[in-house]
Every structure is written in structure tokens, then in C-alpha cells.
Amino acid sequence: MEIEERGFVVGASYHIVKEKKSNPIMKGTYQMVLPSKLAQQGGKGAGNNYINVSAKADSVFEQIRIIAKKISRELFFLKNYS
């Protein structure tokens, strides 16, 4: 898979928007860097090198599937080890 085909997730937030007894509906917002924009700008310059995309679903897994279809990229979650 090419680097331009991935959405590198650098941040995420979650909010419950509709409470149900069994499965609450959550809104997840994911911030992703855009490698193609970074390459064009040489890592600097004007414009955003990121996008924020949101989806509502009863699970994080379903949100990721919805967003991947919206942006035609596979979401890639970077690991942060302390």
C-alpha cells in the first residue's frame, strides 16, 4: 500500500450523541495528516496538512469503516510508546 493511500490518524475524540439502553451512538472525530500535502510543501508553507473527519455509529470500528469509505483511504493509527 502506498503512503498516499493511508490516512495517518494523529488525534481522535469521542462524544455520546444519543443514549440507548444497549448501544449508545457516538460521534468520533479523527484528525489525519495528509502525506501528499507535506510532500508538496516540503514540510512547511501555507495551508493545512491535515483533515478532520467525523462519523456517528455505535462502535469505533464502525466509525472507522464509515470514514474510510468517505475519504477513500485506510485509516492508520500511529503507536505511541512512552
Image (cartoon, grey):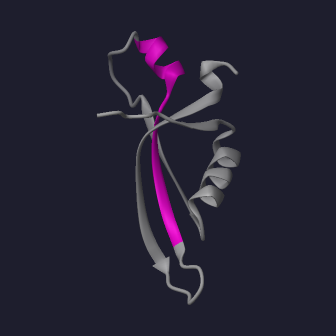
Q: In which quarter of the image is residue 57?
A: bottom right
Where does residue 69 sit, x and y in percent of width and height? Answer: 71, 47
For residue 41, above or below residue 49? above
Q: Which residue is depicted at the point 59% across and 79% down? A: 23
Whole-percent x, y for residue 76 in the image: 56, 35
As for residue 38 lying within the magenta part, the answer is yes
The quarter in which the C terminus is drawn is top left
The residue positioned farthest toward the left in the image shown: 82
Q: Which of 52 and 81 is in front in this view?
A: 81
**Closer to the camera in the image, 59 or 46:** 59
Q: Residue at x 46, y 55 (%)?
A: 29
Residue located at (60% from left, 71% from top) = 58
Is 40 part of what is drawn in magenta? yes
Q: Is residue 72 toward the left or the right of residue 16 in the image?
A: right
Q: Position of residue 17 (x, y in %)?
A: 47, 76
**Which stretch did the figure color magenta?**
26-41
Looking at the image, is 31 positioned above or below residue 46? below
Q: Identify the residue at image location x=66%, y=48%.
A: 70
Please count the marks in the image. 0
Q: In which quarter of the image is residue 49?
A: top left
- Point out residue 48 in the picture as x, y percentages from the top left corner: 39, 31
The quadrant in which the N terminus is found is top right
View extreme (bottom): residue: 21
Q: Is residue 67 above or below residue 78?
A: below
Q: 26 above or below 72?
A: below
